[in-house]
Amino acid sequence: MLLAAFFGVLVWASSHLAPVGDPDAPLHREISPAGTPVAGAHYIHESYRDAHTENMVTVVLADYRAFDTLGETVVVFAAGVGVFLVLARRKA
Amino acid sequence: MNLFIETTMFLLLIASAIAAIELRDLLAAVVVTSVFSFVLATLFVAFGAVDVGFTEAVVGAGVVGVYYIAMLLHTEGRADD
Amino acid sequence: MITHSNISPILRFACRSAARIIQVFGVYVIVHGHYSPGGGFQGGALLAAAVFLLRIGEGREHSQRDMPSRVTLLLGSIGVLVYGAVGLLTIATGGRFLDYDAVPLPGLSLDDRHYWAILVIELAVGLAVMAILVGIFDRLLQRFHHD
């Protein structure tokens, strides 16, 4: 019952989303509805000039958001260390 | 045509998710989980998120499936409930 | 228990060939991440998948020369430390943390400095992800092999 209600809410909400690839969607404009510049437009304009790299996703991941990628790597490392400690062979 | 393919993909996604929960044989459930990840990766690519789709295909359909099967070697391979 | 002797030669040859192809593709995904989708994380996971295939198809002992089990944690640490060292290097040369304008590569323009710094970062992430995934896989199967 709760599941059906939640499913209904999701379908109702997704019917109000902008169509995929719509260039006039608020997400894809250079100025947001609140009147501030959108960060994505800055990356699209500047990424090749800043880093001489065609792939914008790589520039965002490894340059503008390098600190987040460092955190992601540390999380993977911490997961590995956790498995090593939990599954360490016990000296009988 | 595009809408038809995406609808088919979503139905496959839901069917594989339900099958992964309901299957009694755990090895089959792991395989269906990999199918779920692969369909999800295809949907990501269809929506233009190629990097996310690539990660999902490699990690979700490959590495996680191998980990599950490695852990299945320690069990009986059947769900009781 | 999986040993080298009870795996058929056909299976061994197939796993070995496929693993080499996957490894080449993984390195390509890492170093070509500037121009096509992919990067350190995806390429590292592909390299790890190739090592999984060798571990399954050749047996645990004979795949040790491709990727020894005991160096996995060491390699993962090296990957994370190289990433952090690039960040600290840019502080030491007068920039902010991970500010690639300050990478000390003489004779390169600012955008080329970013280019090479991103390549180093991707290699470090790929090394760390590959080593940690292989290490987790070895530890998961360890008790099974030693019982």
Image (cartoon, rainbow, N blue to C red):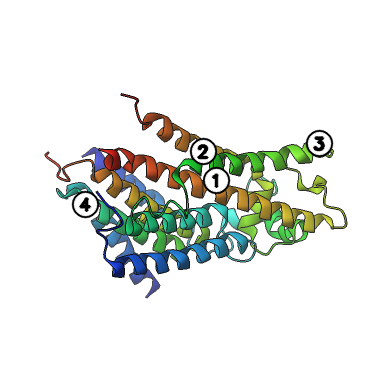
Same chain under badges 3 and 1? The reply is: yes
Mark 3 belongs to chain: C
Amino acid at dot 3: Ala
Q: Give the residue type that dot 4 points to.
A: Leu
**Mark 2 and mark 4, same subunit?**
no
Quarter of the image for residue B81 reads: top left
Mark 4 and mark 1 in contact? Answer it, CB < 8 Å.
no
Q: Are marks 2 and 3 in contact (CB under 8 Å)?
A: no
Q: CA distance from mark 2 to mark 4?
A: 28 Å
Q: In the rendered image, which residue does mark 2 sit on? A: A77
* Quadrant housing the N terminus of chain A: top left
Q: Earlier in the sequence, mark 3 or mark 1?
A: 3
Crowdedness of circle 2 by 10 Å Cα count: few (<14), some, many (20+)? many
Foreground: A73 or A22?
A73
Res. C128 mark:
1
Marks 3 and 4 sit apart, C-alpha to C-alpha, by: 52 Å
Give, as a three-letter code, the residue at label 2: Phe
Q: Chain of mark 2?
A: A
Give the vertical position of A3 relative to B45 (above or below). above
Q: Which residue is mark 4?
A: B27
- Residue B52 located left or right of residue A41: left
Regarding mark 3 in the picture, which secondary structure is present there?
Answer: helix
Q: In the figure, residue B1 lies in which quadrant?
A: bottom left
Residue B51 location in percent, x, y? 52, 59
Residue sitting farthest toward the left: B80
Q: Which mark is residue C92?
A: 3
Q: Nearer the viewer, mark 4 or mark 1?
A: 1
Q: Quadrant of the C terminus of chain A?
A: top left
* Label 4 SS: helix
